[in-house]
Amino acid sequence: MTIQPIYTPGQSITVGAPATVANLVCGFDILGLALNAPQDILTLTISDEPGIRIRHTDDYQLPVAPSANVAGAALLALLETLPVPVGFDLVAHKHIKPGSGLGSSAASAAGAVVAANLLLNDYFSKPDLVRFAMHGEKLASGVKHADNITPCIYGGVTLIRSVFPLDIVPLDAPPLFVTVVHPQIEVRTADARQILKQQLPLRDAIRQWGNIAGLVAGLLQKDYALIGRSLEDVIIEPVRSILIPGFDAVKQQCIEAGALGGGISGSGPSVFMLSEAEHTAGQLERIMQEVYAKIGLPCKTYVTTLNHHGVTVIPPSSI
Ligand code: HSE
């Protein structure tokens, strides 16, 4: 017998969906972490009127047709498996700029399905929600990757051991400060994937999986030096960093100033750096601002920390 979802037509919920840093330098498509800032704000209302209606209150001019919208695509996937014909009205205010490399599409898709699930009294499991939200990623980048979606839903640092079948491993991590610079250019994930080499020398693969294992071990053992040594990417960064003006200067100067390490956030153009101490994180922000001021490219910076909760409900009193 199919279990019926319990819901109240007309009920609304507002959630905050965090930005995420995918890849974590060496873990292309398999590692990611959630940030405390920035975050998107989504309000979802459940109704008996089937279908999905989307409205944006930001200036990004994103499509509102459900099948052309990442949150819409994720909600459509969720509705397909629901045994009752409900509908959703979504009002989204994005603070994570699309094409920033900070998991903007993941925040929309993950935020929408987590909100829907809350309105459905937790009808679905977290892995189900990741599967639905990946439909949004497929729409945005052409590929169902889960390295932004998963930390956005679970919080913290996550490992996607496998997408098909989905195997998610939340990873413990020591306190970390994250400094992010978003140079104001747009890099489309689909384009940044297109330029990647499809084959690689075995020696590069060996170096890369040494780094991935080192990073995971460093996080679990709270060994900052090991984390730092492992933040090295010999496969993706050499290809993609060419798309990001100022990348080499930011990286070199931040590491000299005491960053544990860092690199391209997701598919860029944002660049992130991890630090053990807050004052270092602040210093890195100033370095990033100086690099882009010199180049004459406007940028936005964030100094933030790991978000351990993922998508969270925002009480009506704080909206
Ligand atoms: N792993 C994906 C990529 C993340 O690097 O293409 C995109 O945000």
Image: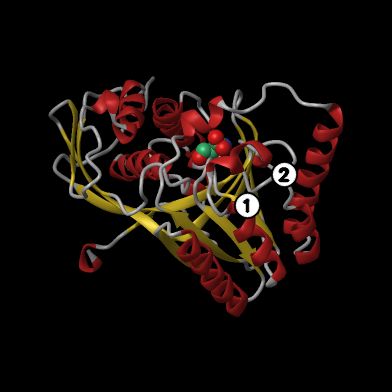
User: For the point 32% across and 45% down, which residue is it?
Assistant: 115
Ligand 1, seen in the image, is in the quarter at top right
Respond yes or no on whether mark 2 lies under 8 Å from ligand 1: no
Say whether disc 2 or disc 1 marks the residue closer to the N-terminus.
2
Q: Return the mark for residue 293.
A: none
Is 29 above or below relative to 214?
above
Q: Pointer 1: residues within 10 angstroms few (<14), some, or many (20+)?
A: many
Say what secondary structure mark 2 lies in.
loop
Q: Pointer 2: residues within 10 angstroms few (<14), some, or many (20+)?
A: many
Q: Quadrant of residue 64?
A: top left
Respond yes or no on whether mark 1 lies under 8 Å from ligand 1: no
User: For the point 12% across and 29% down, which residue is it?
Assistant: 49
Q: Nearer the viewer, residue 316 or 184?
A: 184
Residue 127 showing in the rendered view: yes
Residue 212 at x, y = what percent? 75, 44
Position of the N terminus by quadrant: top left
Give the labeled residue for mark 2.
233
C-alpha separation, residue under disc 2 versus residue under disc 1: 8 Å
How many numbered marks, from 0 up? 2
Is 185 above or below relative to 178?
above
Residue 146 showing in the rendered view: no
Give the labeled residue for mark 1.
263
Dot 2 amino acid type: Asp
Position of the C terminus by quadrant: bottom left
Answer left or right for 24 relative to 319. Answer: right
Q: Quadrant of residue 236?
A: top right
Answer left or right for 272 relative to 208. Answer: left
Dot 1 amino acid type: Gly
